[in-house]
Amino acid sequence: MIEIERKFLVTSESFKDEATSETRIVQGFLNTHPNRTVRVRIHGNKGILTIKGLSSNDGTSRFEWEKNISEEDAKDLLNMCEDGIIEKRRFEVPVGEHIFEIDVFDGENDGLIVAELELTEKDELFERPDWLGTEVTGITKYYNSQLSLQPFKTWNQ
């Protein structure tokens, strides 16, 4: 399946007033190669194994394959991951016809808040809420795989 996604920084936490859900996520990477990443995630109380391919030149699309696995299997795989486990809280916020997934990072990425929006077409129109900031689609340092290697807290060093 091809995933089409855009990413944005978030300028305030006012989105929390509009959120319909909040879920804790812990994830790690078994492989962070630029051509493919293999991620294991515990999303709430379920496990997910994801393989993502190389991004398009503009960073908006790439192949993504996901498979649900048990939480226990995910915990076991997290122990095998490369260094740099990602911890975050994900908020789902409906805006018009779309749902923004907003990740509030913890741990070594504390202070970073990123909104992701999945689309069905690259040029699809969507409403821009007041809290939506600068677009960072295609800027690799905002990819979770890269945040695991070069956390947000180290960017100003």
Image: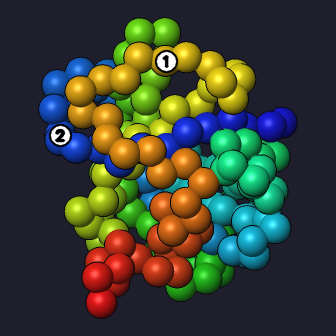
In the rendered view, tell whether residue 118 sits above or below residue 18.
below
Which residue position is annotated with label 1? 126
Q: Residue furthest bottom?
A: 157
- Give amino acid for label 1: Phe
As drawn, is 63 to the left or to the right of 142? Answer: right
Q: Picture coordinates of residue 95 (x, y %)?
A: 38, 16
Image quarter where the C terminus lies is bottom left
Q: Picture coordinates of residue 38 (x, y %)?
A: 73, 65
Crowd rating for badge 2 (residues with CA inside 10 Å; few <14, some 14–19, many 20+): few
Question: Mark number for residue 134?
Answer: none
Residue name at image x 55 percent, y 48 percent: 137
The local secondary structure at tag 2 comes to loop
- Give amino acid for label 2: Glu
State the CA–CA distance, disc 1 to disc 2: 20 Å
Residue name at image x 30 percent, y 23 percent: 129
Q: Picture coordinates of residue 33 (x, y %)?
A: 75, 75
Q: Is residue 62 visible?
A: yes
> Within the image, what quadrant is residue 16 found in?
top left
Q: How is the image coloured?
A: rainbow
Question: Mark number for residue 13?
Answer: 2
The local secondary structure at tag 1 comes to loop
- Foreground: 135 or 63? 135
Sequence-earlier tag: 1 or 2: 2
Residue name at image x 48 percent, y 39 percent: 116
